[in-house]
Image: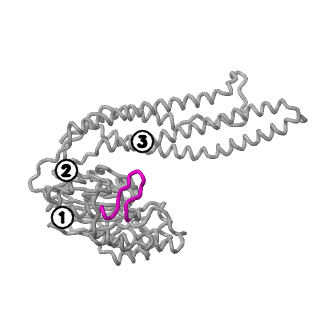
Amino acid sequence: MRSRPTSVQRFSNYLIALSALTILSGCNPPAQPSVEAQAEPAQAAEPSPYFELSVLHARSSMLGARRAAFEMAINTVEASVQREQRENPQVRPVMENPTVLSLLVSANNHGEREDCGCKANPLGGLTRRHTLVDLARLGAVDESMRWWGKSVPERSIVFTADAGDLLYAPRGFENAAAPRQELLFDQARAIVDALNVGPPDAFNVGEHDLALGLEKLQVLQKVAKFPFISANLQKEGKPLFASHVVVERGGARVAFIGVARDEEATKTYYEARGLAVRPALEAVREAAALLPEEVSAVVLLSNLGVEKTRELVGALQSEGIALTAVVVSNTASTTISPLWAAGVPILEPASRGKHLGRLDLYLQDATKGAGAVRFANAVSDPLVELRDYRRAVTGFYRASEAMDKMLIELEAMRVEIAQKQAALVELEAADENRAASESALASLQARHATSASRLELYERRLAMTADTYVRTAGTLSALSATPGAPAGSDWVEGQVIAVKLAIPEHAGVRKVLDRGKPRSQK
């Protein structure tokens, strides 16, 4: 197995140093001068009224130059990594009679039944996603390769699951008119009916699946031919759903554990529906303790988003709680290849059902249980990490540029206010122009005060993006370290693909969806 690309080792320290330089210059803006005149010591030279403004313009120019340097540097790194990956591709080692588990996974469907209707590149649709699942279940390797590529295993045991936010779009419906709510519920019912054609093994109830309330969701649960799970959703101190489900197929047993978003920001959302949510760590810990020892794999379906899920996986692994793979919802982003946390692969398909994920787990000895699984290729894809880093850096630069623009605007107004105040001193009290000058000065001072009141928001945004910047720089630093020898003998291949319109529609699902359409759409 190859080591991480040397390009990352060569350039990461430079990128991190550039990060530190930019953060130090961007997070400590010059103190905002007061509009009020300041008394200067007699011995001090009188500064130019434009001095501070010139400093701010120079600082902004330096920031722009650093951003240009960063773009050149990271483009060089990405190109070099891509070249090295082409020249030294990761290759799965020869394994003697491995057990191959294929997990076909979805998330962030957001109430979509058909394709997204996007003008530029329409994708998605339950009919096409079901075709991809059916091809895997039927072992149609050649046809599957057409969409997934040549990495599709010749034989595997197929499991399917949805990580949550399946039924409704991520926006509130509390104030929608009754007819609108009924239409949304009917559409959610059509999704459940369509999935019933080839039921998934598990569905994790996500935050947005409760948009119309618990009673509506329980109606859908009764007609579903697949299990609804959640380890941390409660009502009056009692669990609403099973915390997990264990599925046995082809001699393998896979456990699915589900958790809903548990951040403080969602507390009011759940309380408005008469519900409560427990901390995910506590809930998963208890669910894992209930699993039989002989499960081949433990799959976490997490509605926490990618970053919170990574933290959760690290905490669980530190406690010795085994996870084999994780599927995420609620970030609504796409992980083209797996991200990693504590040796566990993580996938998330993007929003509106436009993508489908696949994890092929090659287990050397599935009889040893999930706790014995160790992936030999448990290394983050440096391109994924670099692109995350680029996004974080770009966000910080944008926040810094917005802050500089605001400071320059405030300083320019301060200079103009000082000039108007000086001019006003020269006017006689009875001067016919004095009233107009006083009015103009008051208007400018009011504008300055309004702009200055927004400065805290810009500072907060800058601090938040700087924090993200620092975290991703830490990830990049870890990539630059030379890895040790692979710790395991198992292997995982994962990807998320776009559900293209060229994929044939599943006739059975098409029939169900057509039957559930309102008359106006038929």
Residue 91: give its label: none
Q: Earlier in the sequence, mark 1 or mark 2?
A: 1
Q: CA distance from mark 1 to mark 2?
A: 17 Å
Secondary structure under tag 2 reads loop
Amino acid under disc 2: Lys
Amino acid under disc 3: Val
The residue labelled by disc 3 is 470
Task: Indicate the position of residue 176 as horizontal and vertical percent values.
Answer: 53, 69
Q: Earlier in the sequence, mark 1 or mark 3?
A: 1
Magenta stretch encompasses residue 102: no
Asked if residue 499 can be seen in this view, the reply is no
Secondary structure under tag 3 reads helix
Q: Residues within 10 Å of mark 3 (few under 14, many from 20)?
A: some
Do the residues bearing badges 1 and 2 touch, measured as CB atoms within 8 Å?
no
Q: CA distance from mark 1 to mark 3?
A: 47 Å
User: Between tags 3 and 2, which lies in front?
Assistant: 2
Examine the image and state in which quarter residue 424 appears: top right
Main secondary structure of the magenta stretch: loop
- The magenta region covers 113-129
The residue labelled by disc 2 is 150
Is residue 516 toward the left or the right of residue 255 in the image?
Answer: right
Q: Say which residue appears at 28% left-offset and 38% top-offset.
A: 82
Q: Nearer the viewer, residue 164 or 472?
A: 164
Q: Nearer the viewer, residue 442 or 17?
A: 442
Q: Residues within 10 Å of mark 1 (few under 14, many from 20)?
A: few
Task: Indicate the position of residue 90 as horizontal and vertical percent values.
Answer: 20, 43
The residue labelled by disc 1 is 138
Examine the image and state in which quarter residue 17 appears: top left
Q: Is residue 222 above or below residue 174?
A: below
Amino acid under disc 1: Leu
